[in-house]
Image (cartoon, rainbow, N blue to C red):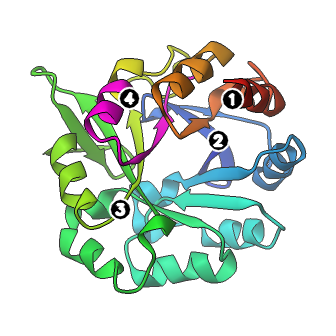
Amino acid sequence: MIIPAIDLIKGKVVRLHQGKFNLKREYIYDPLSYIKKCIKENAKKIHLIDLDGAKNPNKKQLILLKKIFKYNLPSIQIGGGIRSNKDIDFIFNLIPNSQIILGSIIIQNFEYIKQLLKKYNPLSIILALDIKYDKNNNKIIFINGWQNKSNIIFEDIIEKFLHLGFKNILCTDISKDGTFLGPNISLYNEIIKKYPEIFLQASGGISSLKDIINLKKIGVKDVIIGRAFLEKKFTIQEANLCWQKE
């Protein structure tokens, strides 16, 4: 599936360059107007990230999110500062068909994530693993809106959570995100071959319809696209058609 991404800082639609808050691009779209535009172009799901909440869970944009959630949305996956059952219930109560994206908390509190299985369907949860390569070519997880290095390796996290029944994995190569340099095909190909049971979402660097074709060919389930849609490299309709043809 092709999923348009909407990142929010202080109520504005933005894109970060390689996860750097000081290298953000602001767009003229009002968030709800852009969501409506995506729906009009036949987006089946929206990827929504509260970057203020991701950076500081105490600064989630709750008023804006409530305003957005009042609209008749398609399926939505949302992340950014989600740290508790209260945060999760807030979203599920407003949009029952949504999925929760968990990032920092899966690194910081493994025991809590295990407890989630007693209350929530693991298929309603997406594990966001945002990586940078170190000098030894290890995939190191970054947290808190990509601001902090965890020193935890991607494979170690995957293997812990697959045993619990989590299947939805969103992986972003931070060095590619917001760059138009193309996605890290070799990274995703390696992950899919090693863990064929997961449902992999790819994010970061997509700049052309060919990128979409290449991701579909290796078995990626969903492609998250932000800047390319915002800057009109191609339309959602064109991306959907490309995806369906492959």
- Please state the extent of the stretch shown in magenta in the rendering: 189-206
SS category of the residue bearing label 1: helix
Tell me the amino acid under the disc marked 3.
Phe
Q: Do the residues labelled 1 and 3 touch (CB within 8 Å)?
A: no
Residue, x 69% and y 61% (percent of image)? 75
Q: Could you say which is closer to the camera, residue 8 or residue 118?
A: 118
Q: Where residue 188 is drawn, which disc sits there? A: 4
Badge 4 or badge 2: first in the primary sequence? 2
Image coords of residue 119 (percent x, y): 41, 86
Q: Name the residue under label 3.
A: 166
Q: Which residue is drawn at 53% across and 83% down?
A: 89
Q: How far apart are marks 1 and 3 (CA)?
A: 25 Å
Q: Find residue 184 and report its horizontal and vertical position in percent.
A: 41, 21
At a point 76% along the width and 70% down the height, the residue shown is 67
Along the polypeptide, which appears first: circle 1 or circle 3? 3
Q: 113 or 143: nearer the eye?
A: 113
Q: Which residue does the numbered mark 2 point to in the structure image?
A: 1
Q: Could you classify mark 1 by the number of other residues whose Cα lies within 10 Å: few (under 14), some (14-19), or many (20 or more)?
A: many
